Amino acid sequence: MAVMEFFYDFTSPYSYLASTRVEEAARRAGGEVRFRPFLLGGVFKATGNRAPVETPAKAKHMWVDLERWAKRIGVPLVMPTTFPVASILALRTALAAERQGKLVPFTHAVFRACWAEGKDIADPEVLAAVASSVGLDGPAVVAAAPEFKAVLMAQTQEAVDRGSFGAPTFFVPTARGEEMFVGNDRLEMAVEALTEGRTGHRGS
Amino acid sequence: MAVMEFFYDFTSPYSYLASTRVEEAARRAGGEVRFRPFLLGGVFKATGNRAPVETPAKAKHMWVDLERWAKRIGVPLVMPTTFPVASILALRTALAAERQGKLVPFTHAVFRACWAEGKDIADPEVLAAVASSVGLDGPAVVAAAPEFKAVLMAQTQEAVDRGSFGAPTFFVPTARGEEMFVGNDRLEMAVEALTEGRTGHRGS
């Protein structure tokens, strides 16, 4: 089965939007998704890219654009208590959750807590409660987070080495080799490539 | 009739892509398009935004993304001889062409020369030939370009004042007031807003 990799950071609202539909989209294409948390700040640093919010006119438009997308997709979206969201603890905890086979439900729960419920996911207690809600030992998995510092760095560097410069980033295996797609607004194209890669049909 | 404003710069390949379909899209929505050339470099300077090509990883992906879009839309796309394209003369000439009621055909002809035929639109002779091809007195209209320096600056500043930070930018009148959409990949949303603005229907 063709596997689409989905690199995301909890700090990225466009990653949240993509997270709400990437599995269903891949399934319709006959493929599946591999969830891969990475540190967007590390990607920006490595590539010299900047967050949209660093340009005021762009930041202002970004919130409008996000609300349009949330309405289009039909998902709740609230502004988090602080932005940018300090996501590093949540990302490391996600890797700890992955070790216990709970990466995907934990990821959805964190995105929801942050972007649908406005909770402060930088708070270890909030994070532990989120982890507990998906069947993990919340305090234990958050306490294990520091052990995953190097894994998170490696995963981030890997994405950069493969060409990523933002979030979300999708990598799709195709007949033409690996293809990269960046942005929630490129999910449809990524899924089309996944379909082609799976069927060998290159389209028109 | 609802009018969507389309701010574009010839240097912007995403503006070219949008130019090939914006009129048909607006027509389907029962509206029409007002073409408004502006200087993207001036927008970047005023807003502190940067061109995608200034970030190498982003630049590399941009060409891939452009080719995907050109294929999707079904239009030719070639890399221009030099990039970024020095578009200021072409933009001023477009305003001179507007004075003679030829802005739209001249705009399409310049975009085509640059992005479909790879011609150097910074060259006054190339530009004059393009102008002549749409029924203008080519050398005369290019010679008149310097007179439109201030108009181009004013049009650019106006877009910035209204919130623009990139190209293409669309402004659409809606029941909620003026809405802005930035990017070839937001044309569909802009047209939906145009439809709503025209019918008073706000959708779901």
Image (cartoon, coloured by chain):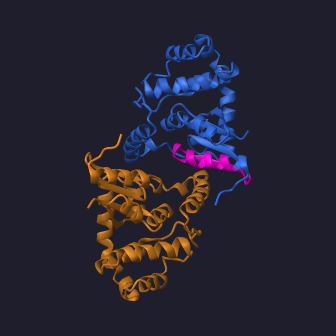
Chain colours: A blue, B orange
Identify the magenta region.
Answer: A175-196
Q: Is residue A174 visible?
A: no
At x 56%, y 65%, the residue is: B74
- Frontmost residue, B9 versus A26: A26
At x 40%, y 86%, the residue is: B138
Q: Quadrant of the N terminus of chain B?
A: bottom left
> Measured along the vertical axis of the image, is residue B90 above or below residue B203?
below
Quadrant for residue A141, please give it: top right
Residue A191 at x, y = what percent?
61, 45
Does the magenta portion include A193?
yes
At x 64%, y 33%, the residue is: A36
- Frontmost residue, B132 versus B49: B132
Q: Quadrant of the C terminus of chain B?
A: top left
Residue B196 at x, y = what percent?
31, 50
At x 39%, y 39%, the residue is: A67
> Measured along the vertical axis of the image, is residue B169 above or below residue B10?
above
> Measured along the vertical axis of the image, is residue B87 above or below residue B144?
above
Does the magenta portion include B189?
no
Q: Is residue A87 visible?
A: yes
Residue A21 vs residue B103: left or right?
A: right
Residue B101 at x, y = what percent?
30, 78
Residue A186 vs residue B147: left or right?
A: right
Number of dots carrying numbers: 0
Residue A20 at x, y = what percent?
53, 33
